[in-house]
Amino acid sequence: MKTVRDIPALADIPVLVRAALNVPVENGKVANSFRLRKAIPTIEYLRKERAKVVLIGHIGEAGTETLEPVYEAMKLLVPGLKWCRVTVGAEARAAIRAMRGGDVIMMENLRRNVGETKNDAEFARELAELADVFVEDSFDVCHRVHASVVGVPTLLPAYAGLQVEEEVRQLSKALSPENPALAIIGGAKFSTKEPVLLKLLDVYDRVFVGGALGNDFVKAMGRDIGISLVSNADPKEIKNLLNNRKLAIPLDAIVGPLDGTPETAQTCGVDAIPADKAILDDGPKTTAMLVDYIRTAKTVLWNGPLGKYESGFTSSTFELAKGIAASGAFSIVGGGDTVAAIEEMGVAAHFSFISTGGGAMLDFLAKGTLPGLDVISQ
């Protein structure tokens, strides 16, 4: 895979950098700058080589959000960063022509144009008109077939950024783990997790499923899970996985009303969930089981929180983060809430690699490649 180091000439050349700018914004301010910090090495490399660095990216799902709060946070990391209120067109091209070598500009949210998510050829062409070279450094969207991910690289010389290069290197290690190897998959949506679970069960010694994903497995065992959230998954597919001796599921749970708080929750075994309660977090026996697994593991892979993290059910996720950080195992983690927990606890330095991808990380582990990587490898 060609990287930014392979670009033959950069001085005064406009370079379109697809960056990971989709970060959480609360009350008009960036709440977690992890992805932005990971974008800096590629930006600084290009800047040092006197390229004109044009940052493009998205934020949110609606297509109405603005990247302005991200720009405000990013300019603290990239002194002199400029802002463009549009993404493409005459105004955007004029702003880039006015740049000097070493300048960096951020364009407005790609998804304000419906052509981005539709992989529209005309929108890809408009983006390509902004620069002479394309750099993919947003691993978190490399699983998307969007205009800026797979369209533009067919129109410009395309290279991987330093973060994407590192993602591929480190996640490839996770596909050939040193044993004993433990994988922990949380979050929700069985349909998006099934391919990676099948892959991990082939190469890992133990695969634990928790969080809302674990509810599907507890239910498939014929246990009452009350009003807990579940996927519309085929029970037969889940039961096939349950037959694998490597698979582990929760032993107990923290339960309460769906809109409950940790203060009003209670703990019970997964075979005794009250009919009017929901599973909101994995319980202490489950966490203790995982910590025991971690103590003997040489490789630990983790993606997705173990509880309803956004509602304050963080206990099992925090305990898991502490256990992995203290283990000395080669550890790879990913997923937005997972990374947020690690950063909140201040233990990020104790993990071997923290991915900027959630769904992209899982897709890469399942398939060994992604659409956004294939197109820059051609």
Image (cartoon, helix red, strand yellow):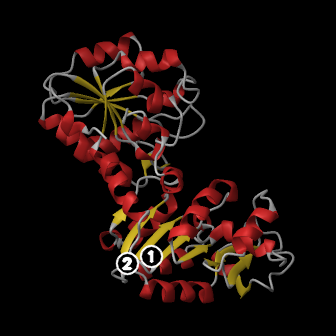
Q: Quadrant of the N terminus?
A: top left
Residue in front for this viewpoint, 116 or 193 = 193
Outermost residue to the front: 202
Could you tell me which residue is drawn at 29 percent across and 41 percent down?
Answer: 161
**Which residue bears the numbered disc 2?**
325
Q: Where is residue 377 in the image (x, y as percent from the top left)?
A: 36, 36
> Residue drawn at (46%, 68%), measured in percent from left and top?
341
x and y percent of residue 347 in the render? 35, 73
Q: How many marks?
A: 2
Q: Which of the labelled discs sits on residue 321, or is there none?
A: 1
Residue 186 sits above or below residue 57 on the image: below
Against 31, is 333 above or below? below
Dot 1 lies on which element? Answer: helix
Question: Residue 131 at what x, y percent from top left?
Answer: 30, 20
Toward which corner of the image does residue 354 lie, by quadrant?
bottom left
Residue 145 in sight: yes
Asked if residue 33 can be seen in this view, the reply is: no
Q: Which residue lies furthest to the right in this view?
A: 275
Q: Is residue 195 left or right of residue 178?
A: right
* Residue neighbourhood size for the residue with mark 2, other residues' Cα within 10 Å, grouped as few (<14), some (14–19), many (≥20): many
> In the visual, does 235 lie left or right of 155?
right
The kind of secondary structure element at disc 2 is helix
Residue kind at label 2, given as amino acid type: Ala
Mark 1 in CB contact with mark 2 (< 8 angstroms): yes
- Residue 84 lies, in percent from the top left, at 35, 24
Residue occupying the point 87% across, 77% down: 275
